[in-house]
Image (cartoon, helix red, strand yellow):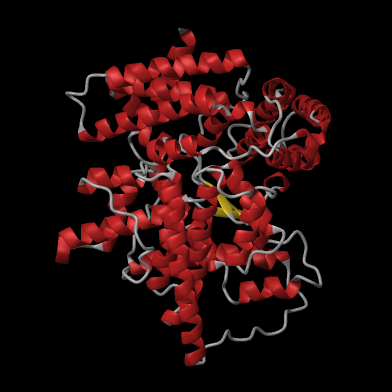
Amino acid sequence: MRRVLAGCALALALAWPCAARAAQHRPSAWEVLESRVVAAVAAANPVDATQLGLHRYDTRLPDYSSTGVRRTVQRLQGLLREVRAFPTAKLTRETLLDRSLLVRELESGIRYRDVEKLWQKSPYFYAAILSSGIQYLVINHHGSADTLAGALSARLEGFPRLLQQATANIHEPPRLLCQACAQTLHVMPEMYRSALPAACKGASPGSLRRLDAAMVTASDGISAYLEGMGELEEEHGTDDYPLGQKHYDWRLRQVEGLDLTGEQLARQGDAWLADVEADIAKLTDARKAAGIADAPVGPTPQDFSREQILQSFVASIDSAKRFVRDRDLVTIPSNIGPLVPTPTPPDMRPIVPGMAMLPPATFDASTAGTYFLGGAFPDSLTASNRDRFYSRMARHEILGGSVHEGIPGHHLQLSIAKGRNSFTRRFVNSTTMVEGWAFYCEELMARAGFYGPDSLVYLQRVLPGIRFRATRVVIDARIHTGKMTYEQAVRFMRDHNPQMDSVRAPGEVLRYVTEPTQAMSYLVGKSLIVGLRAEVERREGAKFRLKAFHDRFLGYGSIPVPWIARDWIGSVPAIGRYRLARMTP
């Protein structure tokens, strides 16, 4: 009982932004239940809680013993019954939507443990928990250096226990997920030895001694696990890596609110890909006819450095922010913090070869986001890559990534969601909304003139990005419903995306294997946003204002786009053609 009450008190304290307001506000029965749900979900997923800024859980790793999973499922089932039974007569429209979102969160948590059971199938499932558990602590630094060192030590000391649970739970694991697991685990010990003491600079000698010992404990646990699993080599696994059609369809319908099956989604991806490839061919012919060619880039300066590349990313983020303000595309709140470009940590690279970002933690005072640069930032400049990286910088090819990850993309959207008063809206997350918005912003900025006034130039930037995301839709849907093998998916990716080399394409597809429905969310989410915008514009006519549309849309928080559409216009726009030609600036 004390644990539940303590979690409730913590959640309520975090729900109300200042102490004075917390003292004046008497929480309603709904707010008490809401906070209990969030506390229970956070306790079951302590690594995710750290990312959200719920720092009470910073020293923990999840319990995936059979007893622990059963206990968590029972707790979530009990809360689900309470949420469903809660009287709705006096709830506001906003709170009714929050109630539905909590049902979604609880149903998903139960199903992932009790039906899909990736904890019994995927070695990578555990590697991702361990990797994220340390990364989130370092990035979402909380408290003193001693506090950070203590949390890192506690989690590192927990590595052997979680890996022992993995050994007990997993039998005949899929080879592909073994590969992802081994790639991630192998680089951890050395990376931690080089990075964690520096992250804890200023900690006491005792804290640092414990951290050193904890790193040894974690390294030994990793070595024992890899050795016990036969280094997770191919002969120890199976080919059974897809999520499965039933589970994939459930995620589309219940988690993302899409009235589509995996097969229907794959066919839609085929249509999108055919459309955009035809447009790319037309664009190529039009550029040739107009005599437009890429302007040559001068010789690479002898003193060209990695620091210049990093500073170019910083400048591109600032440039996008100024452009959004100058064109009045969306409101940028005054409390938006910086987005900090940084090299991607080695243990993330096998699964996240491209750019990515981590937002500021939702429930603490942090405002800075972290922008992982992936392959766009070299470990070193060599004779073979200097010209290529200089050319990308000189041509401002990094602008699109900074739009997507920064402003008006992820960093702005997630920072606004962080400021939502609704506790539930700050807690839940939907990839169709988050990725769909960031992808929508790429074309929004292009059409507004961010890349220059020439339509053929901005189309040259936009269309390959749409083709890449259409390819993702096809692969994600078909690989997880068992209609496409990993090898076929890698070939498909390279065949349709000339920029994909033999290193990046396998890593991209491996990421899709480990994160079902994430890859499809970019183009699906964007199509839904464009459809919603078109319907709102049709209804409002001359009163329609683009900035007002964007502000209201972002004001919903990071919830599924179909849920936003139903609340706003009473229906969900049909997903059709990718609508490039219909979208005006």
Establish if 222 lies above or below 356.
above
Q: Can residue 331 be seen?
A: no
Which of the pair 25/218 is nearer the observer? Answer: 218
| Depth check, front residue: 354 or 515 | 515
Residue 257 at what x, y percent from top left? Answer: 36, 41
Where in the figure is residue 398, as x and y percent of width and height? 57, 67
Query: At 24% from the left edge and 43% from the top edge, which residue is drawn?
Result: 567
Residue at 51% from the left image edge and 82% from the top image edge: 284
Q: Quadrant of residue 208?
A: top right
Quadrant in which the C terminus is drawn: bottom left
Q: Is residue 199 left or right of residue 429?
A: right
Q: In the image as oriented, which residue stretches furthest toward the front?
A: 483
Q: Residue furthest top?
A: 1
- Image-quadrant location for residue 168: top right
Residue drawn at (26%, 31%), measured in percent from left and top?
Answer: 95
Residue 182 visible from this viewpoint:
yes
Q: Is residue 124 above or below residue 574?
A: above
**Left or right side of 18 for 401:** right
Residue 484 sits above or below residue 42 on the image: below
Q: Going 65% across and 33% down the picture, which residue do you hit?
A: 122
Towards the viewer: 403 or 316: 403
Q: Where residue 217 sits: x, y (%)? A: 80, 25
Q: Position of residue 151 (x, y in %)?
A: 65, 27
Say how many tags the image has: 0
Q: Which quadrant of the rendered structure holds the N terminus?
A: top left
Q: With respect to residue 110, does 309 lie above or below?
A: below
Task: Name the image quarter holding residue 379.
Answer: bottom right
Position of 129 compared to 466: left or right?
right
